[in-house]
Image (cartoon, rainbow, N blue to C red):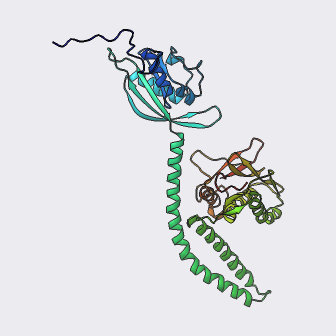
Amino acid sequence: MIRKLPPPKNQNLYADHDDRTPRPRTEQFEQIIDSLNSGVIAFDTNGVIIMVNHAARRYLRMSHRQLHKGMQLDGLQLPGPFVDVLRGVMASHRPLSRREIIVSQPDGSRKEIGLSASLLKGPHAFNGAVFLFVDMTERRRLERAAEHNSRLAQIGELTAGVVHEMRNPLTVISGTAELLQRKTPLDDASRKIVNTILLEAQSLEKLISQFLGFAKPSDLETTSCRPEAIAERAYGLCLPRARKKDVKLDISAAPKLPQMRADFGKLAQAIVNIVNNAIDAVPNGGHVTIHTRRESGVIVFEITDNGPGIHLRPEEDIFKPFFSKKESGTALGLGLAIVRRMATAHGGSASYTNLEEGGIRFSLRIPIEQGILL
């Protein structure tokens, strides 16, 4: 007969093996839940919170006073879409595998939350539910960026094939128009027609060059250069356009900016695309500014104007290819798509903000943690 020995005296079965300060199992369990990066909220059968962790408060932007154990679900000041899901599970007594909801933040930003619910086990048919949720915002942003890049690659391949076929006959048209222009007297009535043909052929050639610049891979030829010099190059290229429209174009830079490794020409062209859009947007006599500064580990090229700003519908993206709010957008809306591509090729980003006082600020951020020469 095997005799079952009792446990040693004073042994706490719920303590860690090497923890000299035994703690109840409930306390350890709560500590584990509170350490999770995922938000956790559990309710009993009456809709009273029996567990909530720190991540839940962080995702919902709520303090301990606003969200803690013992609070009733109906009394919580939670975002509408979020509380609707909670109430639906508590009312239906059914688990939820995955639901993605959009939660608006006080600062105007939005979080994409992935929410699941499991039913608590117990003696009754329904013993409450535990909700697990994570912030999907960054993951969804990366997925959309990957999808966007895939579409760009497909468009690029198609565009490259089409424009190559267009360039050959266009070269013949341009050459013939130039020959006719040289042979047509200045006072000949047909010279105006020839000039129109040549002008339109030149416009098509410029359009094709921009198509090819967008379609071909962005292989960078990086060199050591100063951010101020890149901005000054863009300033010089845009100045004649600004003067023609009587737009005041200013340039400034923060002191002691470091050198950086970048493709001087392509980065300057990206700034030119933004500045030219700004010049087109502001009224005659308007104001456009190029400012270069350092922000933590990036160089920021800021282009600010006093135009009408950009007002889009939620599904619109000004950086998408062929998107334009103007009747005659640069390369049918490729200008800012090229800006984004150049920023991405440099490991940076492009964004814009409407200003409260009117106008808009474009920001081109290029990281400098690599290849920096102090």
Q: Is residue 91 in sight in this rendering?
A: yes
Q: 127 and 257: which one is in front? A: 257
Foreground of the two, 214 or 365: 365
Q: Position of residue 195 (x, y in %)?
A: 72, 80
Q: Which residue appears at 76% of the width and 64% of the height?
A: 233
Image location (x, y in percent) of residue 355: 74, 44
Among the 4 quarters of the image, the one containing residue 259: bottom right
Determine the residue positioned at 50% across, 67% down: 158
Relative to 23, residue 179 above or below? below
| Residue toward you, 28 or 97 | 28
* Residue 160 found in image quarter: bottom right
Residue at 72% x, 61% y: name it.
Answer: 225
Residue 145 lies, in percent from the top left, at 53, 51
Side of 359 relative to 102 (left or right): right
Q: Quadrant of the C terminus?
A: bottom right
Count of numbered labels shown in the rendering: 0
Q: List the single residue furthest toward the top.
A: 9
Residue 327 in view: no
Farthest residue, direction left:
1
Q: On the rendered structure, is 296 left or right of 85?
A: right
Residue 16 location in percent, x, y?
42, 21
Residue sitting at 44 percent across and 26 percent down?
131
Please state if 316 lies on the left or on the right of 49 as rendered: right
Above or below for 70 versus 186: above
Pick the quarter of the image with the N terminus. Answer: top left
